[in-house]
Image: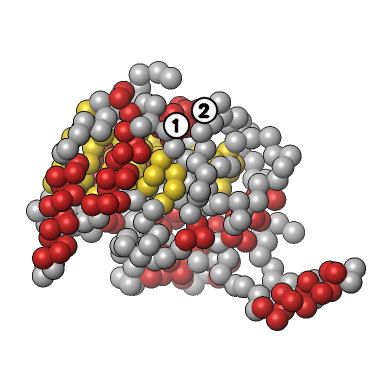
C-alpha cells in the first residue's frame, strides 16, 4: 500500500454509543495509524431537548478522548446543519484538499481491513472514469445471493451505497445538487424507469427530496451516477455493518434484516477489470431493493405448485434482465 492514503471523513451528531463503537472499530483498522481522520460534529437544533444537547456534548468528548488515527482534526459546528448539508459541504471541503475521500457516518462498524479495501479500490479504479464511487457495504446473503461461480470480490452496481463509501474529486464535482434535470425526468416515464433500475424506490426518493419531504444528499449522488452512465463498485461481502438500524438515525428506521453478522477480512481482492453488469447480480440487487412483495397465500400456492413438479403460479417481475 502506498503512502497516498485517502483521508477519512466522519460525521457525528448526538449518538454517543454509536459514535464510540464506530471509532473503536476504525481505530482497529490496519491502516488507521497511517491515516488522517476528519470528524465533523453537528450542532443542536433549535428547541433541542436537554437530553439531545447533553448527548451532543458527550459525543464531542468521545471524539477527543483518543488519537483514533495518525492525525485527527475535529470540526465543531455551533449550528445544526443537518446530515445532508454537512456531508455535501464537508466532503467538498476535504476532497478539494486531498483529491479523494473515504466517508463514514457515526453508526458504522468496520472490518479491520476496511481502510485497506477502500484505498486499494480507490487506486485501482481512479482512472476508470465511469466508476463514480466505491462502496464498502453489501446486503447480507439472505437478501442478495452472489453466484457461486462469480470470479471476483466486487461487482458493478447501478446504485451507490452510503454506508461507508469513497470517491474522487473529479467525480464529486459532477454532482448537480439542484438536480436541474428533475422537471424533464418528471415528464418522462421511460427515464424514471431507467433510473429505477437500481431499485423501484429511487425515483420516489428523488421526488421526496425535491419536494422537501426528505432531507438527504445521497439521491443527488445517485442521480450523478445515472446521468453520467456511471457505476459504483460494491464488495461481494460487506466490509461494514450498520449498528444504527435501531431507529436512532436521522434517515434510518429499524431494518435489522440488513445487518451483517460477518464482516469481510479479505485484503487480496480480485477486482473487476472489465466493468460489465453481471445480469444475475444486477437482477438480485434489484430484487433486494424492490418493495413489491407477494402475499403469503400466493407464496404458499407457488410452493405447493413447485412441490408437485410445476412452476410458480404467481410471479412478480423483479428483474432488469430476463
Mark earlier in primary sequence (2, 1): 1
Residue 66 visible here? yes
Q: Residue at x 69, y 71 (%)?
A: 316
Distance between the alpha carbons at the discs numbered 2 and 1: 7 Å
Percent across and percent down for residue 142 are: 61, 56
Local packing at callout 2 (Cα closer than 10 Å; few below 14, some 14-19, many 20+) is: few
Closer-to-camera residue (101/189): 101
Local packing at callout 1 (Cα closer than 10 Å; few below 14, some 14-19, many 20+) is: many
- Give the numbered dot on residue 113: 1
Percent across and percent down for residue 28 are: 35, 32
Q: Residue at x 23, y 37 (%)?
A: 38
- Asked which quadrant contains residue 177, the reply is bottom left
What secondary structure is marked by label 2? loop
What secondary structure is marked by label 1? loop
* Quadrant occupied by the C terminus: bottom right
Closer-to-camera residue (153/307): 307
Q: Are marks 2 and 1 in contact (CB under 8 Å)?
A: yes
- Asked which quadrant contains residue 235, the reply is top right
Residue 91 visible here? no
- Asked which quadrant contains residue 272, the reply is top right
Q: Residue at x 78, y 78 (%)?
A: 301
Would residue 311 appear left or right of 7 to someone viewing this image? right
**Residue that mark 2 sits on:** 267
Would residue 312 appear left or right of 245 to someone viewing this image? right
Q: Residue furthest right?
A: 309
Percent across and percent down for residue 127 are: 48, 29
Amino acid at each position: 500500500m502506498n503512502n497516498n492514503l485517502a483521508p477519512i471523513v466522519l460525521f457525528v451528531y448526538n449518538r454517543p454509543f454509536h459514535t464510540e463503537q464506530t471509532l473503536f472499530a476504525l481505530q482497529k483498522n490496519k491502516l488507521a495509524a497511517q491515516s488522517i481522520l476528519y470528524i465533523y460534529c453537528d450542532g443542536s437544533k433549535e428547541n433541542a431537548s436537554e437530553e439531545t444537547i447533553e448527548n451532543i456534548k458527550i459525543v464531542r468528548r468521545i471524539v477527543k478522548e483518543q488519537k483514533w488515527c495518525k492525525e485527527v482534526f475535529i470540526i465543531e459546528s455551533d449550528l445544526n446543519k443537518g446530515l445532508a448539508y454537512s456531508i455535501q459541504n464537508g466532503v467538498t471541503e476535504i476532497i478539494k484538499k486531498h483529491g479523494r475521500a473515504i466517508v463514514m457516518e457515526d453508526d458504522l462498524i468496520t472490518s479491520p481491513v476496511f481502510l485497506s479495501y477502500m484505498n486499494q479500490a480507490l487506486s485501482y479504479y481512479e482512472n476508470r472514469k465511469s466508476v463514480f464511487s466505491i462502496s464498502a457495504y453489501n446486503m447480507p446473503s439472505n437478501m442478495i445471493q452472489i453466484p457461486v461461480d462469480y470470479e471476483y470480490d466486487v461487482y458493478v452496481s447501478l446504485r451507490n451505497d452510503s454506508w461507508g463509501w469513497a470517491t474522487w474529486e473529479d467525480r464529486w464535482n459532477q454532482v448537480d445538487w439542484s438536480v436541474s434535470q428533475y422537471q424533464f425526468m418528471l415528464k418522462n416515464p421511460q427515464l424514471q424507469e431507467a433510473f429505477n433500475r437500481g431499485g423501484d424506490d429511487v425515483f420516489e426518493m428523488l421526488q421526496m427530496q425535491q419536494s422537501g419531504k426528505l432531507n438527504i444528499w445521497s439521491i443527488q449522488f445517485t442521480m450523478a451516477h445515472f446521468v453520467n452512465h456511471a457505476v459504483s463498485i460494491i464488495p461481494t461481502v460487506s466490509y461494514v455493518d450498520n449498528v444504527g438500524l435501531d431507529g436512532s438515525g436521522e434517515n434510518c428506521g429499524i431494518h435489522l434484516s440488513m445487518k451483517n453478522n460477518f464482516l469481510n477480512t479479505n485484503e487480496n481482492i480480485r477486482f473487476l477489470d472489465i466493468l460489465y453488469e453481471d445480469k444475475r447480480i444486477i437482477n438480485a440487487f434489484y430484487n433486494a431493493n424492490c418493495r413489491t412483495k407477494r402475499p403469503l397465500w400466493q407464496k404458499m400456492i407457488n410452493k405447493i405448485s413447485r412441490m408437485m413438479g410445476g412452476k410458480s403460479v404467481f410471479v412478480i417481475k423483479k428483474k432488469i434482465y430476463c
